[in-house]
Image: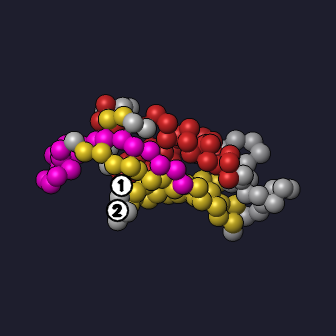
Amino acid sequence: MYRIGIKRRFSAAHHLEGHPGKCSRTHGHTWVVEAVFSSEEVGPDGLVVDFDDAGKALEDAIEPLDHVYLNEVAPFVELPPTAENVARVLHARLCETAGRPGWKARLESVTVWESEDARATYST
């Protein structure tokens, strides 16, 4: 099995309604997102997917969340903007890209870091 990973960053603020701690107050993060793609084989070019293509796909998935207040952006108006839910939403957006013709890759997981010490992963 081949696995490749690509990371990107974005900045966004949020708060967690009903959280018993500081996270109930509006605060921001420089979120780090890693997408991992996997495949049993590589293409004729020797790649699972080109890093540039994977990076562009991740940037496109992230763009609507960059420099916004997540609580005011769909789907987080209704869905708590936790790291877990951000990972799941980005995973869903990337699944559409990873299914494009010509990609040997399957999206395996999306990991979101709120800080150097705290992360959440969504995988299928």
Is 106 inside the magenta-drawn segment?
no
**Observer able to see residue 122:** no
- Residues at circles 1 and 2 in contact by the CB criterion of under 8 Å: yes
Q: What residue would you read off at disc 1?
A: 114
Looking at the picture, which amino acid does disc 2 mark?
Ala
**Observer able to see residue 33:** yes
Indicate the position of residue 49 as horizontal and vertical percent values.
Answer: 71, 53
Disc 1 versus disc 2: distance between alpha carbons?
6 Å
Disc 1 crowd, CA 10 A, few/some/many (<14, 14-19, 20+): some
Using the image, determine if residue 45 lies above or below residue 79: below
Residue 10 figure quarter: top left
Residue at the location (72% across, 52% down)? 50
Dot 2 falls on a residue whose secondary structure is loop
**Side of 44 relative to 105 (left or right):** right
Q: What residue would you read off at disc 2?
A: 118
Is 20 inside the magenta-drawn segment?
yes
**Side of 48 relative to 25 (left or right):** right
- Quarter of the rendering occupied by the N terminus: bottom right
Disc 2 crowd, CA 10 A, few/some/many (<14, 14-19, 20+): few
Residue 44 figure quarter: bottom right
Indicate the position of residue 85 as horizontal and vertical percent values.
Answer: 37, 48
Residue at the location (28% across, 41% down)? 14
Highlighted range, magenta: 7-25
Closest to the observer: 35 or 89? Answer: 35
Looking at the picture, which amino acid does disc 1 mark?
Glu
**Side of 31 relative to 92 (left or right):** left
Residue at the location (60% across, 59% down)? 5
Dot 1 falls on a residue whose secondary structure is loop
Indicate the position of residue 97 as horizontal and vertical percent values.
Answer: 63, 42
Using the image, determine if residue 40 lies above or below residue 55: below
